[in-house]
Image: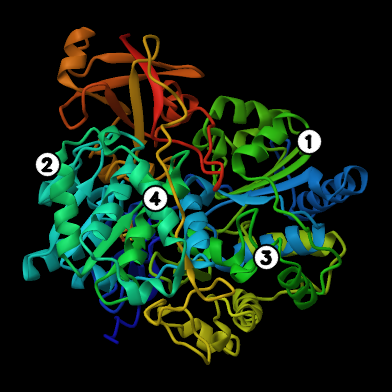
Amino acid sequence: MTASRTDEIRSTCPYCGVGCGVLLRPDAHGGLSVRGDPDHPANHARLCSKGLALAETVGLSHRLTAPQIEKQSSTWDEALSLVARRFSETIAEHGPDSVAFYVSGQLLTEDYYIANKLMKGFIGSANIDTNSRLCMASTVAGHKRAFGTDTVPQTYEDLEEADLVVLVGSNLAWCHPVLYQRLIHARKRRGTKLVVIDPRRTATCDDADLHLAIAPGADVPLFNRLLAVLHDRGLADKAFLRNTQGYEDALAAARQDDPAVTGLSELQIAQFCDLWASTEKVVTVFSQGVNQSTSGADKVNAILNCHLATGRIGKRGCGPLSVTGQPNAMGGREVGGLANMLACHMDIENPRHRRAVGDFWSAPTMPAHAGLKAVDMFRAVGQGQIKALWIIHTNPAVSMPDAASVRAAIASCPFTVVSDITDATDTARLADVLLPASAWGEKEGTVTNSDRTISRQRAALPAPEGTRPDWAILAEVGRRMGWETEFDYGSAAEIFREYAALSGIAGEFGLDFDISGLSGLSDLDYADLAPTRWPVCRAKQGGRFFSDGRFFHTDHKARFVPVSYRRPAAKTGPRYPFRLNTGRVRDQWHTMTRTGLSPRLSAHLAEPFIEIHPHDADRLNIGPAGLVRVESPIGQAILRARITDTVQCGQVFAPMHWTGETAPAARIDDLIAPACDPVSGQPESKASVVRLEPF
Ligand code: SF4
């Protein structure tokens, strides 16, 4: 390991799922300098614009430093006692399913673990869900259906060893920039072919050999055609297929789909299939364009079906790779942060798993069924079924679909607690109790990135007086609810050891997530923990899964999932003729509570906008930089027009970052209907319908 300067502290970037290592050096004025960690396997010293601007986003001006009850400052003792009492009373009167936690991929694994333990093991409900539901839930569902567990088989190095990389629904150049830099670097060295499948011509297409501007939501028929072509060319790997089930059914379903619905020409489809079929080392990267869809899980399985059919999985430079949006979306999945999972990839509806976790925790009760997923959770809040709600490090008042209804639901909830580092969010303003949390750069814990690498986040700055780490807040509420011994933690290291020991049970059940080799870390070992790819146990250390043809269903065989095209839930028509796609811009993150503090980042794209094709703008008499009223069946927004042929005729694109604080009329999620994938519960954020008119 390259020595960092002695005054530098190794940590991890708090933004995207690439999980870049950073070296932090505190200055004498309470600030930091930040550079990329040359020894971190995710980035090897690289950082993108957001990582490089991290130093501009620390500081105390925007921080919440004392709890608030009904907008009045209070002591911690008053606030925590009130939270514990109101949750206990609500549970006693209405049962455990009358309360809920909505948490975040911004949480560190240790925080996530305690939240999950408190809700599932002690409150006795599975009503804990996370904003990862908006991000990667379709991938989780697709992985579980195919592999038996939520396993990411590939690593970032595979991108550099592939001869063909297919990016599906991913603007990697803007959304995972360092991974994109690694890919382009490798492409220059070895001539990697690059295919981008995306309705928009994004910055990622600049380097592509082939851009397939697919119709929104039509990925399943494209990959179904590929599966049929692979079979017809005799490329199905007969030996590998012995490790699988359901190939013939998946193939039959694939043949039923009409690839014409992709909007691509036969020639384009043939070019894609030829490239894929003729290249052994192919990595298919997929992201939100696949996940944020009412057929998201099916899209994932359509991709996995092609890799399974050819045995192109779990090998060097060869397999499917989902890239997560958030810094700890993977850690959240691993601790069971989703309402339908248990910790360490165990299943909430499996009685043996449930009993084992309950025994390990000495839990008085464990829920036998999945809890409410994000959209259903806020619907239940609005309908009065959830009477006490705790929202941690996320801003659902503007980031959930049908955000106006979510704001109304939170406002109507009898008791809402919000933990955050600031009171200046739309969600924080709706809180009955506001709890000031420690921020990135001040707290200790771990995160897991998109290729299963666990990295430390470390404190480089003192936490402002009055703030506390999330695990400590959650554990204190657990103690005040009566579980004093079970939530008696003194450090993040202690929680990590317990979590790692619990994962050994998952290993005994034959599951993938086993880091029991880290359960004996001393405090010093934990402090020094270097980036480590799981699993870490006696049976296996890091590396790849599935190269041995063994999967995690009970018979160790992978499953093909027969999938067929389903169009997006909302239909375009005379009243709403445009298809609205949403996404990120290069230099902002989520609802801008951190990146919005950096003048440098705000200079890239300074205000909310909507991209409109020149023909459509002309027809509607919308001029460059003109204001546009955008109306969907459930809401409206006013946005600045960017007239560009990067979007197709009949389609528009708007970023999702701007919120009530910065631009009240530009809340994109007020336009998005809460239609969800029936398998994953993930909302369809990329295929709404809208009408446009000059404002
Ligand atoms: Fe941070 Fe992602 Fe940029 Fe890396 S690529 S510096 S993790 S935002």
Between disc 4 and disc 3, whose residue precedes?
3
Q: Which residue is mark 3?
A: 114
> Label 2 amino acid?
Leu
Q: Which residue is mark 2?
A: 267
Query: Can you tell which of label 4 and label 3 is closer to the viewer?
Result: 4
Q: Quadrant of ligand 1?
A: bottom left
Between disc 1 and disc 2, whose residue precedes?
2
For the residues labelled 1 and 2, the Cα–Cα distance comes to 53 Å
> Label 3 amino acid?
Ile
Residue that appears at 27% across and 36% down? 262
Q: Is residue 58 shown to the viewer in this render? A: no
Between disc 1 and disc 4, whose residue precedes?
4
Task: Identify the image quadrant of residue 198.
Answer: top left
Q: Which mark is residue 252?
A: 4
Q: Which mark is residue 385?
A: 1
Query: Can you tell which of label 4 and label 2 is closer to the viewer?
Result: 4
Between disc 3 and disc 2, whose residue precedes?
3
Query: Can you tell which of label 1 and label 4 is closer to the viewer?
Result: 4
For the residues labelled 4 and 2, the Cα–Cα distance comes to 23 Å
Closer-to-camera residue (335/303)? 303
For the residues labelled 1 and 4, the Cα–Cα distance comes to 43 Å
CA neighbours of label 4 inside 10 A, class few (<14), some (14 to 19), many (20+)? some
For the residues labelled 3 and 1, the Cα–Cα distance comes to 24 Å
Residue that appears at 52% across and 76% down? 556
Q: Are marks 4 and 3 in contact (CB under 8 Å)?
A: no
Residue closest to the far bottom = 538
Q: Are marks 4 and 2 in contact (CB under 8 Å)?
A: no
